[in-house]
Image: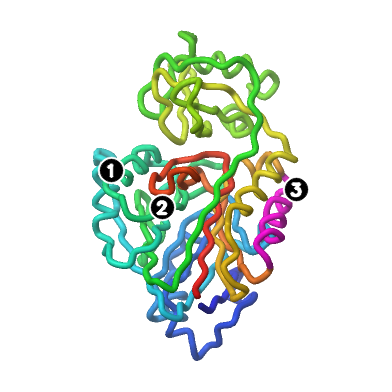
Amino acid sequence: MKLLNLVYEKDWSIKEGELVKDEYSCVNIVFLFGDTDAIKDEKRFFELTELFPNAKIVGCSSSGNILNSQVTKFPIVATAISFDKAFVEISSITFKEEDDIEQISQNLINNLPKENLKHIFLMSDGLLINGSQLARGINKINKFVPVTGGMAGDGARFCETYVIANNVPAQRTIVAVGFYGDSLTIQSGCFAGWSEFGTQRTITKSTGNILYEIDGQPALDLYKKYLGVYASDLPNSGLRFPLNIKENEDSPQEVIRTLLGINEEEKSITFAGDVPVGYKARLMKPDIDELIDGAGKAAEVINKINDKTAFGLIVSCVGRKIVMNQLIDDELEIIQEVLGENVLLSGFYSYGEFAPFQDNLLNCELHNQTMTLTTIYES
Protein backbone atom coordinates (compact mmCIF):
# COMPACT_ATOMS: atom_id res chain seq x y z
CA MET A 1 0.00 0.00 0.00
CA LYS A 2 1.24 3.44 -0.93
CA LEU A 3 -0.25 6.74 0.28
CA LEU A 4 -0.13 10.37 -0.74
CA ASN A 5 -1.38 13.25 1.44
CA LEU A 6 -2.44 16.40 -0.39
CA VAL A 7 -3.82 19.76 0.73
CA TYR A 8 -5.74 22.45 -1.10
CA GLU A 9 -5.47 26.19 -0.57
CA LYS A 10 -5.34 28.05 -3.86
CA ASP A 11 -4.17 24.91 -5.61
CA TRP A 12 -3.42 21.29 -4.75
CA SER A 13 -0.01 20.56 -3.25
CA ILE A 14 1.64 17.40 -1.94
CA LYS A 15 2.45 17.20 1.76
CA GLU A 16 3.93 13.69 2.02
CA GLY A 17 3.74 10.16 0.74
CA GLU A 18 5.39 7.49 -1.37
CA LEU A 19 3.37 7.75 -4.56
CA VAL A 20 5.07 9.31 -7.59
CA LYS A 21 3.20 10.86 -10.48
CA ASP A 22 3.64 7.84 -12.75
CA GLU A 23 1.70 5.81 -10.17
CA TYR A 24 -1.32 8.14 -9.91
CA SER A 25 -3.27 5.99 -12.37
CA CYS A 26 -2.93 3.06 -9.91
CA VAL A 27 -4.68 4.88 -7.06
CA ASN A 28 -7.75 2.95 -5.86
CA ILE A 29 -9.44 5.58 -3.70
CA VAL A 30 -9.09 9.19 -2.57
CA PHE A 31 -10.56 10.42 0.72
CA LEU A 32 -11.09 14.18 1.05
CA PHE A 33 -12.42 16.27 3.91
CA GLY A 34 -12.91 20.01 3.87
CA ASP A 35 -14.58 23.19 5.02
CA THR A 36 -18.10 23.36 3.63
CA ASP A 37 -17.63 26.36 1.34
CA ALA A 38 -14.44 24.89 -0.12
CA ILE A 39 -15.49 21.28 -0.59
CA LYS A 40 -18.92 21.98 -2.11
CA ASP A 41 -17.18 23.65 -5.07
CA GLU A 42 -17.48 21.04 -7.83
CA LYS A 43 -14.13 22.10 -9.31
CA ARG A 44 -12.23 20.38 -6.49
CA PHE A 45 -13.86 17.05 -7.32
CA PHE A 46 -13.06 17.28 -11.01
CA GLU A 47 -9.46 18.32 -10.30
CA LEU A 48 -8.96 15.13 -8.29
CA THR A 49 -10.55 12.98 -11.00
CA GLU A 50 -7.98 14.39 -13.43
CA LEU A 51 -5.09 13.70 -11.06
CA PHE A 52 -6.28 10.18 -10.21
CA PRO A 53 -8.25 9.01 -13.26
CA ASN A 54 -8.98 5.47 -12.03
CA ALA A 55 -9.71 6.27 -8.38
CA LYS A 56 -13.00 6.45 -6.55
CA ILE A 57 -13.30 9.90 -4.95
CA VAL A 58 -15.17 10.04 -1.64
CA GLY A 59 -15.39 12.46 1.28
CA CYS A 60 -17.48 15.01 3.12
CA SER A 61 -17.66 18.49 4.59
CA SER A 62 -16.22 18.83 8.05
CA SER A 63 -15.97 20.82 11.25
CA GLY A 64 -12.19 20.64 11.11
CA ASN A 65 -9.71 18.88 8.83
CA ILE A 66 -7.20 16.43 10.31
CA LEU A 67 -3.80 15.73 8.82
CA ASN A 68 -1.53 13.56 10.96
CA SER A 69 -1.19 15.12 14.42
CA GLN A 70 -2.77 18.50 13.60
CA VAL A 71 -6.05 20.16 12.80
CA THR A 72 -4.78 21.79 9.65
CA LYS A 73 -5.57 25.33 8.51
CA PHE A 74 -5.87 24.14 4.91
CA PRO A 75 -9.51 24.22 3.72
CA ILE A 76 -9.29 20.71 2.19
CA VAL A 77 -7.13 17.67 2.90
CA ALA A 78 -7.00 14.53 0.77
CA THR A 79 -5.35 11.12 0.96
CA ALA A 80 -4.80 8.97 -2.13
CA ILE A 81 -4.37 5.22 -1.56
CA SER A 82 -2.89 2.66 -3.91
CA PHE A 83 -3.25 -0.92 -2.64
CA ASP A 84 -0.86 -3.72 -3.57
CA LYS A 85 -3.54 -6.42 -3.76
CA ALA A 86 -6.67 -5.09 -2.07
CA PHE A 87 -9.42 -3.07 -3.72
CA VAL A 88 -12.49 -1.00 -2.85
CA GLU A 89 -16.09 -0.73 -3.98
CA ILE A 90 -18.56 2.01 -3.10
CA SER A 91 -22.31 2.19 -2.68
CA SER A 92 -24.18 5.48 -2.39
CA ILE A 93 -27.75 6.67 -2.01
CA THR A 94 -29.37 10.10 -2.14
CA PHE A 95 -32.50 10.22 0.02
CA LYS A 96 -35.60 12.38 0.26
CA GLU A 97 -37.17 13.76 3.43
CA GLU A 98 -40.00 11.23 3.34
CA ASP A 99 -37.76 8.18 2.77
CA ASP A 100 -37.49 5.35 5.28
CA ILE A 101 -33.90 5.72 6.46
CA GLU A 102 -33.70 2.21 7.87
CA GLN A 103 -34.70 0.77 4.50
CA ILE A 104 -32.38 3.16 2.67
CA SER A 105 -29.43 2.02 4.76
CA GLN A 106 -30.22 -1.65 4.10
CA ASN A 107 -30.23 -0.95 0.36
CA LEU A 108 -26.93 0.86 0.74
CA ILE A 109 -25.22 -2.16 2.30
CA ASN A 110 -26.92 -4.69 0.03
CA ASN A 111 -25.42 -2.93 -3.00
CA LEU A 112 -21.88 -3.79 -1.85
CA PRO A 113 -20.50 -7.18 -3.00
CA LYS A 114 -20.07 -9.51 0.00
CA GLU A 115 -17.23 -11.78 -1.16
CA ASN A 116 -13.92 -10.90 0.57
CA LEU A 117 -15.48 -7.81 2.18
CA LYS A 118 -13.37 -6.87 5.23
CA HIS A 119 -14.75 -3.52 6.45
CA ILE A 120 -17.19 -0.73 5.60
CA PHE A 121 -16.46 2.96 6.11
CA LEU A 122 -19.55 5.16 6.09
CA MET A 123 -20.07 8.89 5.50
CA SER A 124 -23.50 10.52 5.62
CA ASP A 125 -25.23 13.88 5.55
CA GLY A 126 -24.78 15.36 9.01
CA LEU A 127 -28.01 17.31 9.48
CA LEU A 128 -30.88 15.96 7.37
CA ILE A 129 -30.83 12.42 8.71
CA ASN A 130 -31.27 10.60 12.02
CA GLY A 131 -28.00 8.73 12.48
CA SER A 132 -29.58 6.20 14.84
CA GLN A 133 -32.01 5.10 12.13
CA LEU A 134 -29.11 4.76 9.71
CA ALA A 135 -27.15 2.55 12.13
CA ARG A 136 -30.23 0.51 12.99
CA GLY A 137 -30.93 -0.28 9.36
CA ILE A 138 -27.33 -1.31 8.76
CA ASN A 139 -27.42 -3.68 11.74
CA LYS A 140 -30.50 -5.41 10.36
CA ILE A 141 -28.74 -6.37 7.14
CA ASN A 142 -25.01 -6.40 7.97
CA LYS A 143 -23.89 -9.63 9.66
CA PHE A 144 -20.52 -9.71 7.94
CA VAL A 145 -18.06 -6.99 8.87
CA PRO A 146 -17.52 -4.02 11.20
CA VAL A 147 -18.74 -0.57 10.14
CA THR A 148 -17.11 2.73 11.11
CA GLY A 149 -17.39 6.29 9.84
CA GLY A 150 -19.08 9.58 10.57
CA MET A 151 -21.68 12.22 9.78
CA ALA A 152 -20.51 15.22 7.78
CA GLY A 153 -19.90 18.50 9.59
CA ASP A 154 -20.33 22.21 8.89
CA GLY A 155 -18.02 23.89 11.38
CA ALA A 156 -20.12 25.13 14.29
CA ARG A 157 -22.78 26.56 11.93
CA PHE A 158 -25.11 23.54 11.59
CA CYS A 159 -26.50 24.88 8.30
CA GLU A 160 -25.57 22.49 5.47
CA THR A 161 -23.40 19.43 4.96
CA TYR A 162 -22.14 17.66 1.84
CA VAL A 163 -21.00 14.17 0.90
CA ILE A 164 -18.89 13.18 -2.12
CA ALA A 165 -19.68 9.70 -3.45
CA ASN A 166 -17.54 9.51 -6.61
CA ASN A 167 -19.63 12.39 -7.88
CA VAL A 168 -20.03 16.10 -7.26
CA PRO A 169 -20.75 17.11 -3.63
CA ALA A 170 -24.39 16.67 -2.63
CA GLN A 171 -26.67 16.98 0.36
CA ARG A 172 -28.95 14.14 1.56
CA THR A 173 -26.30 11.64 0.50
CA ILE A 174 -24.79 8.56 2.15
CA VAL A 175 -21.75 6.67 0.86
CA ALA A 176 -20.41 3.31 2.03
CA VAL A 177 -16.85 2.32 1.11
CA GLY A 178 -16.21 -1.42 1.11
CA PHE A 179 -12.63 -2.65 1.58
CA TYR A 180 -11.81 -6.04 0.04
CA GLY A 181 -8.94 -8.52 0.15
CA ASP A 182 -7.14 -10.96 2.41
CA SER A 183 -4.09 -8.68 2.47
CA LEU A 184 -5.99 -6.14 4.61
CA THR A 185 -6.15 -5.87 8.37
CA ILE A 186 -8.61 -3.20 9.48
CA GLN A 187 -9.27 -2.35 13.12
CA SER A 188 -11.17 0.33 15.01
CA GLY A 189 -11.24 2.03 18.39
CA CYS A 190 -13.76 4.43 19.89
CA PHE A 191 -13.58 6.26 23.20
CA ALA A 192 -15.10 9.37 24.79
CA GLY A 193 -13.62 10.71 28.05
CA TRP A 194 -16.47 12.94 29.26
CA SER A 195 -17.50 13.06 32.93
CA GLU A 196 -21.07 12.60 34.14
CA PHE A 197 -22.64 15.01 36.62
CA GLY A 198 -25.99 15.63 38.22
CA THR A 199 -28.76 13.14 38.97
CA GLN A 200 -29.48 10.12 36.82
CA ARG A 201 -32.92 10.66 35.30
CA THR A 202 -35.40 8.88 33.05
CA ILE A 203 -36.50 9.95 29.57
CA THR A 204 -40.28 10.13 29.81
CA LYS A 205 -41.28 11.66 26.47
CA SER A 206 -39.46 11.61 23.14
CA THR A 207 -39.94 10.95 19.44
CA GLY A 208 -36.88 9.60 17.66
CA ASN A 209 -34.11 12.10 18.27
CA ILE A 210 -36.37 14.81 19.77
CA LEU A 211 -36.47 14.91 23.57
CA TYR A 212 -39.54 16.49 25.19
CA GLU A 213 -39.48 15.44 28.83
CA ILE A 214 -37.08 14.04 31.44
CA ASP A 215 -38.65 12.81 34.68
CA GLY A 216 -41.89 14.42 33.48
CA GLN A 217 -40.27 17.87 33.24
CA PRO A 218 -39.76 19.88 30.03
CA ALA A 219 -36.35 18.82 28.73
CA LEU A 220 -35.21 22.31 27.72
CA ASP A 221 -36.08 23.80 31.12
CA LEU A 222 -34.08 21.11 32.88
CA TYR A 223 -31.13 21.58 30.55
CA LYS A 224 -31.11 25.33 31.15
CA LYS A 225 -31.20 24.79 34.90
CA TYR A 226 -28.04 22.70 34.78
CA LEU A 227 -26.22 24.85 32.23
CA GLY A 228 -26.49 28.03 34.28
CA VAL A 229 -24.55 30.85 32.59
CA TYR A 230 -24.16 28.72 29.45
CA ALA A 231 -27.93 28.52 28.94
CA SER A 232 -28.12 31.87 27.14
CA ASP A 233 -25.80 30.52 24.40
CA LEU A 234 -27.92 27.47 23.51
CA PRO A 235 -27.85 25.56 21.23
CA ASN A 236 -24.11 26.12 20.64
CA SER A 237 -23.21 25.76 24.32
CA GLY A 238 -25.02 22.41 24.34
CA LEU A 239 -21.99 20.92 22.57
CA ARG A 240 -20.18 21.29 25.91
CA PHE A 241 -22.86 19.35 27.76
CA PRO A 242 -23.89 16.18 25.93
CA LEU A 243 -26.33 13.60 27.28
CA ASN A 244 -25.22 10.11 28.30
CA ILE A 245 -27.96 7.51 27.79
CA LYS A 246 -28.30 3.79 28.45
CA GLU A 247 -31.17 1.33 28.32
CA ASN A 248 -31.29 0.75 32.08
CA GLU A 249 -29.21 1.26 35.21
CA ASP A 250 -27.34 -2.03 34.77
CA SER A 251 -26.62 -1.68 31.05
CA PRO A 252 -22.86 -1.76 30.32
CA GLN A 253 -23.33 -0.11 26.93
CA GLU A 254 -23.75 3.65 27.01
CA VAL A 255 -23.89 6.14 24.15
CA ILE A 256 -23.50 9.90 24.15
CA ARG A 257 -25.89 12.22 22.38
CA THR A 258 -24.94 15.70 21.13
CA LEU A 259 -27.45 18.56 21.18
CA LEU A 260 -28.15 19.88 17.66
CA GLY A 261 -31.03 22.28 18.22
CA ILE A 262 -33.72 23.55 20.59
CA ASN A 263 -37.38 24.50 20.30
CA GLU A 264 -38.34 27.19 22.81
CA GLU A 265 -42.06 26.84 22.12
CA GLU A 266 -42.15 23.06 22.64
CA LYS A 267 -39.40 23.13 25.30
CA SER A 268 -37.77 20.31 23.34
CA ILE A 269 -34.21 19.43 22.34
CA THR A 270 -33.09 17.77 19.12
CA PHE A 271 -30.12 15.41 19.39
CA ALA A 272 -27.93 13.78 16.74
CA GLY A 273 -29.42 10.35 17.45
CA ASP A 274 -32.33 8.62 19.13
CA VAL A 275 -33.15 9.28 22.81
CA PRO A 276 -35.68 6.49 23.54
CA VAL A 277 -38.40 6.71 26.19
CA GLY A 278 -37.47 4.78 29.33
CA TYR A 279 -33.73 5.17 28.86
CA LYS A 280 -31.65 6.49 31.75
CA ALA A 281 -29.91 9.81 31.13
CA ARG A 282 -27.28 11.98 32.79
CA LEU A 283 -25.67 15.19 31.66
CA MET A 284 -21.97 15.20 30.91
CA LYS A 285 -19.27 17.87 31.13
CA PRO A 286 -15.77 18.11 29.67
CA ASP A 287 -12.55 17.22 31.43
CA ILE A 288 -9.71 18.15 29.08
CA ASP A 289 -7.27 15.59 30.48
CA GLU A 290 -9.88 12.85 30.24
CA LEU A 291 -10.74 13.81 26.65
CA ILE A 292 -7.09 13.59 25.63
CA ASP A 293 -6.67 10.30 27.49
CA GLY A 294 -9.78 9.03 25.73
CA ALA A 295 -8.15 9.63 22.35
CA GLY A 296 -5.15 7.63 23.51
CA LYS A 297 -7.40 4.78 24.67
CA ALA A 298 -9.08 4.68 21.24
CA ALA A 299 -5.62 4.14 19.72
CA GLU A 300 -4.44 1.64 22.31
CA VAL A 301 -6.99 -0.99 21.26
CA ILE A 302 -5.40 -1.03 17.78
CA ASN A 303 -2.85 -3.83 17.29
CA LYS A 304 0.24 -2.77 15.38
CA ILE A 305 0.43 -5.15 12.40
CA ASN A 306 3.69 -4.15 10.71
CA ASP A 307 6.04 -1.21 10.12
CA LYS A 308 4.88 -0.59 6.57
CA THR A 309 3.05 2.61 5.72
CA ALA A 310 -0.52 2.34 7.01
CA PHE A 311 -3.54 4.63 7.00
CA GLY A 312 -5.51 5.90 9.98
CA LEU A 313 -8.97 7.40 9.37
CA ILE A 314 -9.98 9.67 12.25
CA VAL A 315 -13.54 10.83 12.97
CA SER A 316 -13.81 13.01 16.08
CA CYS A 317 -16.77 15.04 17.31
CA VAL A 318 -17.05 18.80 16.79
CA GLY A 319 -17.95 19.11 20.48
CA ARG A 320 -14.49 17.86 21.45
CA LYS A 321 -12.90 20.41 19.14
CA ILE A 322 -14.91 23.29 20.61
CA VAL A 323 -14.18 22.28 24.19
CA MET A 324 -10.46 21.62 23.75
CA ASN A 325 -9.93 24.72 21.61
CA GLN A 326 -6.18 25.42 21.42
CA LEU A 327 -5.37 22.04 22.95
CA ILE A 328 -7.15 20.15 20.18
CA ASP A 329 -3.91 18.94 18.60
CA ASP A 330 -3.09 17.12 21.84
CA GLU A 331 -5.66 14.38 21.16
CA LEU A 332 -4.17 13.84 17.70
CA GLU A 333 -0.59 13.83 18.95
CA ILE A 334 -1.32 11.07 21.45
CA ILE A 335 -2.86 8.95 18.68
CA GLN A 336 0.20 9.44 16.48
CA GLU A 337 2.45 8.58 19.40
CA VAL A 338 0.57 5.35 20.17
CA LEU A 339 0.24 4.17 16.55
CA GLY A 340 3.67 5.23 15.33
CA GLU A 341 4.91 7.52 12.58
CA ASN A 342 4.36 4.88 9.87
CA VAL A 343 0.57 5.39 10.22
CA LEU A 344 -0.44 8.45 8.20
CA LEU A 345 -3.54 10.08 9.67
CA SER A 346 -6.36 11.92 7.95
CA GLY A 347 -9.94 12.68 8.90
CA PHE A 348 -12.53 15.17 10.04
CA TYR A 349 -14.50 16.58 12.96
CA SER A 350 -18.06 15.38 12.65
CA TYR A 351 -21.66 15.67 13.80
CA GLY A 352 -21.72 11.99 14.76
CA GLU A 353 -19.44 8.95 14.73
CA PHE A 354 -20.20 5.37 13.68
CA ALA A 355 -18.32 2.57 15.42
CA PRO A 356 -19.02 -0.72 17.17
CA PHE A 357 -18.60 -1.38 20.86
CA GLN A 358 -15.44 -3.41 21.47
CA ASP A 359 -17.45 -6.38 22.77
CA ASN A 360 -19.69 -6.54 19.67
CA LEU A 361 -17.71 -5.63 16.56
CA LEU A 362 -20.51 -6.46 14.11
CA ASN A 363 -23.03 -4.01 15.60
CA CYS A 364 -22.72 -0.46 14.29
CA GLU A 365 -23.60 2.26 16.80
CA LEU A 366 -24.06 5.99 16.43
CA HIS A 367 -21.89 7.85 18.94
CA ASN A 368 -21.41 11.51 19.73
CA GLN A 369 -18.52 13.28 21.43
CA THR A 370 -16.15 10.38 20.78
CA MET A 371 -12.79 9.94 19.12
CA THR A 372 -13.20 7.14 16.56
CA LEU A 373 -10.22 5.64 14.77
CA THR A 374 -10.04 3.16 11.87
CA THR A 375 -6.61 1.79 10.87
CA ILE A 376 -5.91 0.09 7.55
CA TYR A 377 -2.81 -2.11 7.18
CA GLU A 378 -1.87 -4.16 4.12
CA SER A 379 0.43 -7.14 4.50
The one nearer the camera, 124 or 312, is 312
Residue plotted at (58% across, 62% down): 346
Q: Is residue 303 left or right of residue 89?
A: right
Q: Compute the Cα span from label 3 to label 2.
A: 29 Å
Relative vertical location of residue 264 with respect to residue 48 in this rendering, above or below: above
Q: Give the residue pinned by disc 3.
A: 327
Q: Name the residue beneath numbered marker 2.
A: 147
Q: Which residues are magenta?
A: 325-340
Type of the residue with mark 2: Val
Above or below — where is 279 with respect to 162?
above
Q: Position of residue 123 (x, y in %)?
A: 42, 54
Which residue is labeled 1 in the image? Answer: 140
Image position, residue 262 (x, y; %): 49, 25
Circle 3 crowding by C-alpha within 10 Å: few under 14, some 14–19, many from 20: few
Label 2: few (<14), some or many (≥20) within 10 Å? many
In the image, what residue type sits under mark 3? Leu
| Residue nearest the viewer, comparing 174 with 332 | 332
The amino acid at mark 1 is Lys
Q: Residue furthest top?
A: 216
Say if residue 85 shows up in the picture: yes
Q: Nearer the viewer, mark 3 or mark 1?
A: 1
